[in-house]
Image: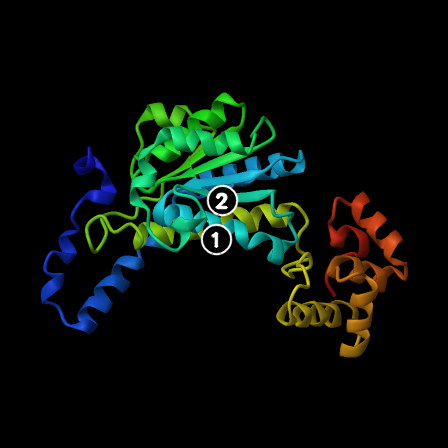
Amino acid sequence: MGEERLTEQRNPRSVRIDGLSSLEIVDLINEEDRTVAPAVARERENIALAVDLIVRCLRRGGRLIYVGAGTSGRLGVLDAAEMPPTFGTEPHRIQGIIAGGPGALVRAKEGAEDSPQDGAAAVDALELGTADFVLGIATSAATPFVRGALERARERGSRTGFLACTPLEEAIRQGHDVVITPLVGPEVITGSTRMKAGTATKMVLNTLTTAAMVRLGKTYGNLMVDLQVTCQKLQDRGERILMETTGLDRESAAALLAEAGGSVKVAIVMGARGVDQERAQTLLDEARGFVGQVVGGLP
């Protein structure tokens, strides 16, 4: 029942929020937000387990699929959408499913979350299988759409995980490969899980995909070397990375990046090893994409 869920409980520190000044409200919200990072940190081992599952699936050619409704669904779609430009992933490899479809990203469709059959149908539409990992995101843990999607994913042989901000009964924990529960406590406005629970969810998703991408060789040290040069900002970033890693000036870095077909990773190897684009790509493939294994550590 709702009254048993941590996300639906009243916060004793904000019961008189409607009588506070603007500054007092800001301070109260800030104080509550300070509890989020420690709650996420307490789930570090489960988050690391989920990272390992994601890496394993992606290395096998599988996919990472987020499933959620409302804020949870939007955060999943957002995280998935940022992977291709940031880490050069193919768009289909990391995807987000939101109850109500794409329209729910910009206009709330609250009733869409109530159908487990729709969740199952969304999973069937992606033809998920044993190489895939599905992470259900439901801060209250009760969303029927998410539960239906996860149940169908298990039936199809996919690995599954659950991200919630309320304690989960043992049956749910036993039904998934990993469960992540950052317990951020009651919200400043009762049940408004776009607040602390949403922040915790964003932190967890950021950590999952960033750690997985690092483990997959998408960075060189802490440099974003597998980005796609699709706009002026990323062109500038790519050139600056090449200037830093190869010692080239801006003009030479831009020319090398163009010769590498816009791939920063390939350009670094070309510059460091004195090889052409094809040979650089072969060396990277042999090293499973890890630039450091081809050219050594950062200078």
Residue position marked by numbered label 2 in the rendering: 96
Say which of 83 and 222 sits in front.
Answer: 83
Residue position marked by numbered label 1 in the rendering: 78
- Asked whether, in this view, residue 255 is left or right of residue 94, the answer is right
Q: Quadrant of residue 268?
A: bottom right
- Tell me which residue sits at (43%, 44%) in the image: 101
- Tell me which residue sits at (11%, 63%) in the image: 18
Q: Is residue 59 above or below residue 278?
A: above
- Density class for disc 2 (Cα within 10 Å; few <14, some 14-19, many ≥20) is many
Say which element carries label 1: helix
- Tell me which residue sits at (25%, 51%) in the image: 192
Where does residue 178 sit, x and y in percent of width and height? 45, 32
The kind of residue on which mark 2 rests is Gly
Would you say the residues marked 1 and 2 are in contact, meaning their CB atoms lie under 8 Å apart? Answer: yes
Give the CA separation, mark 1 to mark 2: 8 Å
Where does residue 289 sit, x and y in percent of width and height? 74, 48
Q: Quadrant of residue 133?
A: top right
Say which element carries label 2: strand
- Asked whether, in this view, residue 221 is left or right of residue 248, the answer is left
- Asked whether, in this view, residue 141 is left or right of residue 158, the answer is left
Quadrant of the rendering where the N terminus is positioned: top left
- Density class for disc 1 (Cα within 10 Å; few <14, some 14-19, many ≥20) is some
- Tell me which residue sits at (33%, 42%) in the image: 139
Say which of 89 and 54 sits in front.
Answer: 89
Where does residue 156 sit, x and y in percent of width and height? 53, 23
Where does residue 204 sit, x and y in percent of width and height? 44, 48
